[in-house]
Amino acid sequence: MTPDHLPQVMAIDAQCYPIPWSREVYESELARTDDRYYVIARPDRVVGNPNAKSSSPNRVVGHAGVAFEESEAHITTVTVSPDSRGEGIGARLFLALALAACRRNTSLALEVAADNPAAQALYRRFGLAPVGIQRGYYKNMGLSPDAVVMRVDNIQQPDYVDRLTKIAVELDRA
């Protein structure tokens, strides 16, 4: 993700969150290249016809980011445009973050809205498990107030890397 992507990224956020991140927050995050990693997703093919190219390949359909802390990689956001959900974009974004995390950290963690079972299922696919509840975590963001804290440890171990490889193969076949 670069600052040039921010108008599209922020338009997606406006559709998804009652109180989205500001441009200043994104710019601050993007400036921290030593301990942050942000990616975008663009449509590269037409769903249902893998040989057809997208008519709007420059359109951003999702974005995600991670903060690298001492031993933990902390997911800051995973967001997919409502009109592009169900196409594996969230999984592809999360895979990019998980692969980056494996190179730098030993664990991966995030908070997810307690009333978002689809996102929780995605994160479980990547081996994250609930480790607690943060009451009121989203209270000031206009979302359901509580968050489930999810985490996976030992992400540099071969079995976790194998999990990511299997997910990548599944996504390539989809």
Image (cartoon, helix red, strand yellow):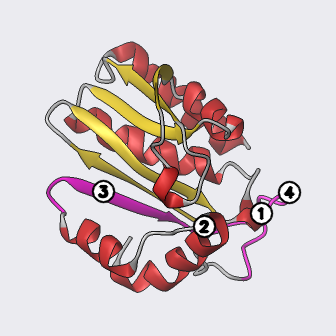
Asked whether disc 1 touches disc 4, contact meaning CB atoms under 8 Å apart, the reply is: no
Label number found at residue 37: 3
Q: Can you identify the residue that label 4 sits on?
A: 48
Which comes sooner in the sequence, label 2 or label 1?
Answer: 2
Q: Secondary structure at mark 1?
A: loop
Considering only vertical position in the picture, is 66 above or below 108?
below
Residue 83 screen position, x and y as percent = 77, 67
Q: Main secondary structure of the magenta part?
A: loop
Gap in Å between the C-alphas at discs 4 and 2?
32 Å
Residue 142's disc is none
Q: Is residue 56 left or right of residue 46?
A: left
Q: Residues within 10 Å of mark 4 (few under 14, many from 20)?
A: few
Q: What span is colored magenta in the figure?
A: 33-55
Quadrant where the N terminus sits is bottom left
Mark 4: amino acid? Gly
Residue toward you, 97 or 48: 97
Packing grade of label 3 (10 A; few <14, some 14-19, many >=20) is many
Residue at the image point whose x is 41% and y is 25% from the top = 151
Secondary structure at numbered mark 4 = loop
Judged from the image, the secondary structure of the residue bearing numbered disc 3 is strand
Q: Amino acid at mark 2?
A: Pro
Circle 2/circle 1 CB separation < 8 Å? no
Q: Identify the mark nearer the N-term, 4 or 3.
A: 3
The type of residue carrying mark 1 is Asn
